[in-house]
Amino acid sequence: MGRKYVVLGMPKENPNSAQPILAKEKEQRYTLKDWAPDDRPRERFVNAGREAMSDAELLAILIGQGCRNYTAIDLARELLNQCGQQISQLGQMEIRELQNVKGIGQAKAVCIAAALELGRRRREQPPAEVGPSLNNSSLIYQNYRRHFEDLQHEEFRVVLLNRALRPIADRTIGVGGNHMTVADTGKILREALIHRAASMILMHNHPSGTLKPSDADRALTARIARSSNLIGCKLVDHLIFTNQGYFSFADATEMCLLDL
């Protein structure tokens, strides 16, 4: 005997639910591409944010494509009907049970099950260890000197911090020649916004071994300090690394450019 399908339905008021109707095999097929761009699940996820998405819309993204006469949203609503609108119940369904909805083949069922399994593993996984609070230049130097040791060219990095001055990300911003490197202010600010950083530390090396900051180093520090303040991300230090030691703008007795 063939597989017994559940007949699909159309929604009433609940955006996740559907009411049974008879399949109309001769109707013209339509897809989510026929919808207004702002109503398509993927576009809504990007433009409105994940919190604005209904369960059916999120599930439709996993399903990808619908079938004849039914969109991915229709299939998602029917799946949610089968589990009583409970995501936890959906996670307990076997592959073959997911396939009982017409239009959900093995590939779609496996994709849904895999996504739910990832969510389950995320809940069970202990929180990631957070690095030490980088509240002084010596600690910064000890933690990041390995990135610059013995380099024969300049590299520029930014470390992004949370409110407790703990690192949440670090990125290589530019790689240059023997005497200079390019530090893209726009790229630094984009990284800060992406990671919602509260503060940042700049660092680069001088292959020549000199610990004295150049005029270009001072100008760059002042420019990034001013720009980062505009987005609410404070520049707390800028370190220059050499194999012999380091220079910290925050520790320097000269006029502190970080407070501009």
Image (cartoon, rainbow, N blue to C red):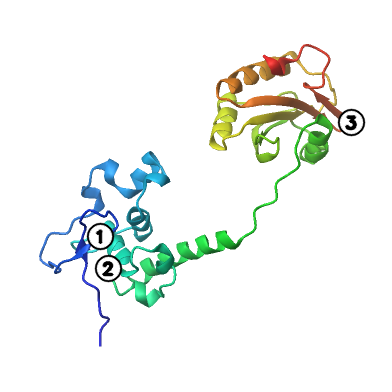
Q: Is residue 210 left or right of residue 223?
A: right
Of badges 1 and 2, nearer the viewer stands 1
In which quadrant is the C terminus drawn? top right
Nearer the N terminus, badge 3 or badge 1? 1
Q: CA distance from mark 3 to mark 1?
A: 65 Å
Judged from this view, the residue extending furthest toward the bottom is 1
Q: What residue is shown with label 3?
A: 244
For label 2, the SS is loop
Q: The residue tagged with tag 1: helix, strand or loop? A: helix
| Residue 76 position within the rendered picture, expressed as x and y whole percent measured from the top left | 31, 61
Marks 3,1: beta carbons within 8 A: no
Give the foreground label among 3 and 1. 1
Quadrant in which residue 72 is drawn: bottom left
Nearer to us in this view, 153 or 1: 1
Using the numbered discs, state the Cα–Cα distance from disc 3 to disc 2 in whole angstroms: 66 Å
Q: Earlier along the polypeptide chain: callout 1 or callout 2?
A: 1
**Which is nearer the N-term, disc 3 or disc 2?**
2
Q: Amino acid at mark 2?
A: Gly
**Label 2: how many residues lie within 10 Å, few (<14), some (14-19) or many (20+)?**
many
The residue to which callout 1 is attached is 74
Residue 51 lies, in percent from the top left, at: 41, 45
Q: CA distance from mark 1 to mark 2?
A: 10 Å
Q: Amino acid at mark 3?
A: Gln
Q: Are marks 1 and 2 in contact (CB under 8 Å)?
A: yes
Residue at which label 2 appears? 103
Q: Nearer the viewer, residue 206 or 68?
A: 68
The three-letter amino acid code for the residue at tag 1 is: Asp
Residue mark closest to the camera, 3 vs 2: 2
